[in-house]
Amino acid sequence: MPHIDIGDLKLPAQYNTLQQGLFDEIRAKIVHGLWATASKLPSTRKLADELQVSRNTVSAVYEQLVFEGYIESRKGSGFYVSLELPDHYLPDNDCKTSIAVSPIQQIKNHSFAPGVPDLSELPLKKWQRYLQIHASRTAILGSHDVQGCYELRQAISDYLSASRSVICNANRIIITSGAQQALSISIMATMNATDTLLLEYPGYVQMDKVAKLFNIDKQHVDVNPFTGLNIEQLLASKAKALYVTPSNQYPMGTTINTEQRLKIIEWAQRNNSWIIEDDYDSEFQFAHRPYTSMQGLAGQLNLDKHVIYVGSLSKVMFNGLRLGYMVVPEHLVARCNEIKDALSGDSPAHMQYALADFIADGELLRHIRKMRRLYKQKHQLMTQAIEQHFGSNVEIISQAGGLHITLRWLGGLDEETLRIKALKHGITVRSLSYYEPDGNKGRTWRGIVLGYGNTPLDSIDVKIAQLADCFFS
Ligand SMILES: Cc1ncc(COP(=O)(O)O)c(C=O)c1O
């Protein structure tokens, strides 16, 4: 295995940040072929000593190089120049078909970008095999049932009834393009232009966008960092539908307990309203068993006719799959199918059949179990690192679950200033104000959301230390 001579690596005379300067230098060596593919890079300690910089800086640079595909990390062995360079940095004479990773895509998947699961842990070889099997089936090349392929609906139905106590069967499930399409269909199937939609506040911006798109009148239900959803406010409303994330409120990370859930279900019955339950990451609870879904609880009271249950494969598989689903009462199925037909027609067949087999063979459950352990570990490291580097200057308000941590602090640094500073170090965080599209309503504290799903275990401490530097400097 060739090793690299670091004698010729110098920090550039000018750079914006030390980290960026070092990153550019190493990348240039690799791109110009001066450091051969498969060569071993010096350890972070050795390079830090050689260049007289901190080991944290070198680790952060290596992590960014791994993220962008220039080098690879091999467990227990070190870092190596990648065998295949990212396409967008190859000389571009004959790479018309190369797929560039756009800056937006990079920022959306950076360390701490919320909403991204650990993409490196996906059993890609297995997944590829399932895709290959169905890719060569002439029989499925034609048009398909707009509701989604039956095998996938059946597999999801089995999974949801066993793991989330959802009351369903394959006929009540509609396969959608991510939870996002399910949210649009839910609104179009249940609301008129004169109806009001209740939204959690702060809340999921992608749902606010749907309300805006359809020009639906909105009301907000406040979410308090400690007491969660303001049930009294909700009970006083006559809205036609409530959008809610009861397992893990997005972005505050609070949950709704059974007593409160029952009150919400009674409210829906009394007003003849809908509950749109978004159960996007309930699989990942670390401190306790997840609550039964609201749909399942309503079903025990024969009230599931008021609930639309929405789920996604984005967290348990990967975002780019763009598959989600909704479970609706029987009488709403035909209307939802009509809407989906008009919006997008049927969903990609190969993906659906591959996913159906993946679930039916137990691969999804295996993957979820493995990821639950890994995310629990990441969550612990995050909380330890936050305690160590921020001390008592910030407070974690989210529960031990899901793929994000929500931090708050009183006074001091503005959350947008912190976000922009962090971005310069390749760290993407979200300000809490992002989740308040109609203004912060006099909130006196500041907060950010940190997604840790796709941040490698061994860079959590370094990244939190860098974020703390941005916070205190
Ligand atoms: C609250 C919430 N709902 C749903 C989703 C999943 O959406 P989709 O399936 O469209 O990727 C996310 C993803 O980040 C989310 O945060």
Image (spheres, rainbow, N blue to C red):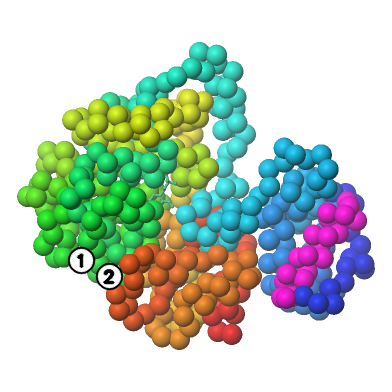
| Above or below, comparing residue 220 to residue 56 in the picture | above
Of the numbered discs in the image, which one, if any, rests on residue 230?
Answer: 1
- Residue at horizontal 68 percent and vertical 67 percent from the top: 60
What SS does tag 2 mark? strand
Q: Amino acid at mark 1?
A: Asn
- Residue at horizontal 42 percent and vertical 41 percent from the top: 178
Tell how many labels.
2
The quarter of the rendered structure image containing the C terminus is bottom right
Q: Is residue 170 visible?
A: yes
Q: Nearer the viewer, residue 233 or 256?
A: 233
The image quadrant that residue 221 belongs to is bottom left
Query: Residue 94: image x %, image y %?
Result: 81, 39
The reply, left or right, for residue 24 in relation to residue 237 is right
Query: Residue 24: image x %, image y %?
Result: 78, 65
Q: Residue 151: within the magenta?
A: no
Query: Residue 305: image x %, image y %?
Result: 16, 38
What SS does tag 1 mark? loop
Magenta stretch: give its range: 16-36
Disc 1 vs disc 2: Cβ atoms closer than 8 Å? yes
- Residue at horizontal 38 percent and vertical 41 percent from the top: 181
Residue tagged 2: 224
Q: Amino acid at mark 2?
A: Asn
- Residue at horizontal 46 percent and vertical 50 percent from the top: 372
Q: Residue 17: within the magenta?
A: yes
